[in-house]
Amino acid sequence: MKEITKVNHVGLRVSDLTVSRSFYEKLGFEFIAGPMGPEPVAIVEHPAGVNINFILNANQADKDNILMRSEEKYTGYTHVALEVTNAAAVIKKLEQLAIPLSGGPHAHGTGTSFFIRDPDDNVIEFIEYLGLGGLK
């Protein structure tokens, strides 16, 4: 469809707004609004334009991310990838914030990627993207 222009937001089911908000604010996101709506949603946005809707209806007792923890590979979204200008600088900043890497860094044909987990075990990839030239 030619009418699609960009990704508007990413929806993440979270168990605790205060904890999630604090975590994402460490990554530079700003609280915009919420909770609001029939299935309560809160919104954070990064100055780069990345918008995340926190879906606030998770089962508080179960924080297991079945897509990422199960031996069986279920279908569904597994992560969001955030493009960065300097992988080494972001890794250093994450270390200062006491946010551990859950994978990487890995150099590959399109750049360097590394991963973290948010408080609800949602996966965030950071990629210093070099383009598709390395795939040829």
Image: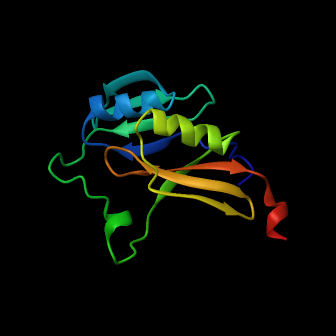
The residue located at (47%, 33%) in the rendering is 96
Please indicate whether residue 77 sits to the left or right of residue 61 in the image: right
The structure's colour scheme is: rainbow
> Which residue shows up at 38% across the image and 45% down it?
118
Task: Name the residue nearer the viewer: 88 or 51.
Answer: 88
Please provide percent x and percent y for residue 100: 42, 47
In this rendering, position of residue 73 left or right of residue 136: left
Of residues 42 and 132, which is closer to you in this image? 132
Q: Position of residue 27 (x, y in %)?
A: 49, 32
When the figure is inspected, residue 93 is found, relative to residue 121, above or below; the finding is above
In this rendering, the count of numbered labels is: 0
Residue at 53% x, 34% y is: 93
Q: Is residue 30 above or below residue 51?
A: above
Image quadrant containing the N terminus:
bottom right
Q: Is residue 75 visible?
A: yes
Q: Residue at x 36, y 28 (%)?
A: 22
Q: Is residue 133 left or right of residue 111?
A: right
**Which residue is the extreme one toward the bottom?**
72
The answer to whether residue 8 of the structure is visible from this angle is no
Q: Quadrant of the C terminus?
A: bottom right
* x then y, percent, for residue 112: 67, 55
